[in-house]
Amino acid sequence: MSFIEFHLLQNFAPSNLNRDDTNTPKSCVFGGSQRARISSQCQKYAIRKHNSFRESVIANGGDLGIRTKKLMLTISDHLVESGKSEEGSKRVCENLLSLAEIKLEQSKDKNQLKTKFLLYVGMNEIAGLKKIAIEHFDELNYENKKKINKKLTKYVEEVFGVHSKSFAADVALFGRMVANNNNSIDLDVDAACQVAHAISTNIVTPAMDFFTAVDDELQAGEQGSGMMGGVYFNSACYYRYAQINIDKLAANLGHDNEQVLGAVQGFFRALVQAVPSGKQNSFAAQNPPSYVKVNVRKDGAPWSLSNAFTQAVVIDKPDEAELEQQSAQKLEMFAKKLSSMYGESGFIFEGRSTYIDNLEEYRGKDCGTISQLEAHMLDALQGALECK
């Protein structure tokens, strides 16, 4: 079994990239001290919505997914635009989705039916459902569901990749779970990618920015602010980790090597470039990673290096470069310790791109630019795929 591991260090200026229900930046206790945190869900959303991910996937013949409750509305609107009646279109859609045992419920305004749960579906899957609805409109247009030809179920199975196991790139990477899915058609997709919650390498305590806003139309003699409030923020150097199971990704993409390469390339580019959008208009924390390490491995199990920071990085003076430097050295030193304990076999490629100095003594190849690191990674991945 082969894996690609990604290790990043990213130091953000004051920001509130990912907040909890109190609008405070997310945090956790790790190694006995409070750390800043960015959830895996937040990172994955930023990655799959980033243009570099979408462009790489499409350029290599892949498909993209959307997460929605409005699948029925999407299909019924298409039928109406094709000249079908609105009432018949809704009935056909309801019956079509019932073949996959996808549960529906009334929206809050009672004007439309939505899927009971958010569905993660590929654009090709949606196109396939639209095609079935058009071509078998009359066969699906019954008020009594018992009259529906169950043979149509096989077409629905084909649309959802039940037999081909070929899914949209982001569905293949991040998986799909349909809640309460006791269906005869298995809609679940096991994720090929795992993304850890990013945690700060340093101890972080959130601060609050108290602000006031002036009313531009104050009259003569009027004083005071038009409004006031507070925004919580923090500043932290994050360790970010993700890994992709190459074998699982290949299986989820129907063993189409071009699509696998496109999905990994897009994931890598977005992993490096995508920044969560939370409160960016207020803080503009557009800080790229200072350190990116990639390992391509066969056999064994992937390694997170988060335990390099069970003891937080502590600096004596507010020198951001020093925080990044110490974080990178701790990361490399811990990776060296793991290798001395478990051995170095199974590594196909180890490389990094960084502007941090004095890392030459540690394992791995300094690849230069991010683009050069990407090229080395894809060459190693291509070799791993050809060996299957």
Image (cartoon, rainbow, N blue to C red):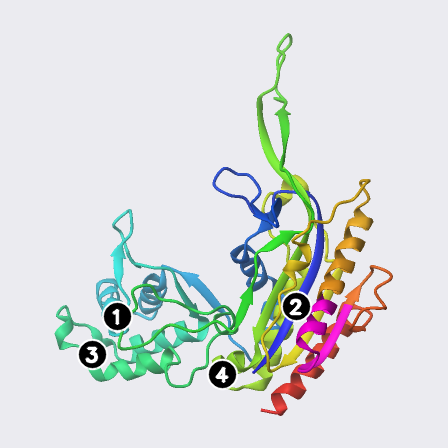
Which residue corresponds to the image point at 60% horizontal and 52% vertical from the top-left? 276
Depth-wise, is mark 4 or mark 2 nearer the camera? 2
Which residue is farthest front? 341
Gap between marks 1 and 2, in whole Å? 38 Å
Pointer 1 or 2: first along the chain: 2
**Nearest to the observer: residue 138 or residue 271:** 271
- The amino acid on which the numbered mark 2 sits, given as a three-letter code, is Phe
Residue occupied by mark 4 = 251
Q: Which residues are magenta?
A: 335-352
User: Splitting the image into 4 quarters, where does residue 383 fall?
Assistant: bottom right
Residue 238 image position (x, y, % from top left): 67, 53
**Nearest to the observer: residue 184 or residue 235:** 235
Task: From the viewer's perspective, tell me whether residue 194 is left or right of residue 125.
Answer: right
Q: Say the numbered circle drawn on residue 139.
A: 3
**Nearest to the observer: residue 46 or residue 4:** 4
Residue occupied by mark 1 = 101
Task: From the viewer's perspective, tell me whether residue 154 is left or right of residue 257.
Answer: left
Does 319 appear in magenta? no
Depth-wise, is mark 4 or mark 1 nearer the camera? 4
Which residue corresponds to the image point at 33% horizontal and 71% vertical from the top-left? 82
User: Splitting the image into 4 quarters, where does residue 87 fall?
Assistant: bottom left
- The amino acid on which the numbered mark 4 sits, given as a three-letter code, is Ala
Gap between marks 4 and 2, in whole Å? 21 Å
Specify whether residue 248 is in view. Answer: yes
Gap between marks 3 and 4, in whole Å? 34 Å
Q: Say the numbered circle drawn on residue 6.
A: 2
Q: Are marks 1 and 2 in contact (CB under 8 Å)?
A: no
Residue 266 image position (x, y, % from top left): 62, 71
Neighbours of disc 3 within 10 Å: few (<14), some (14-19), many (20+): some
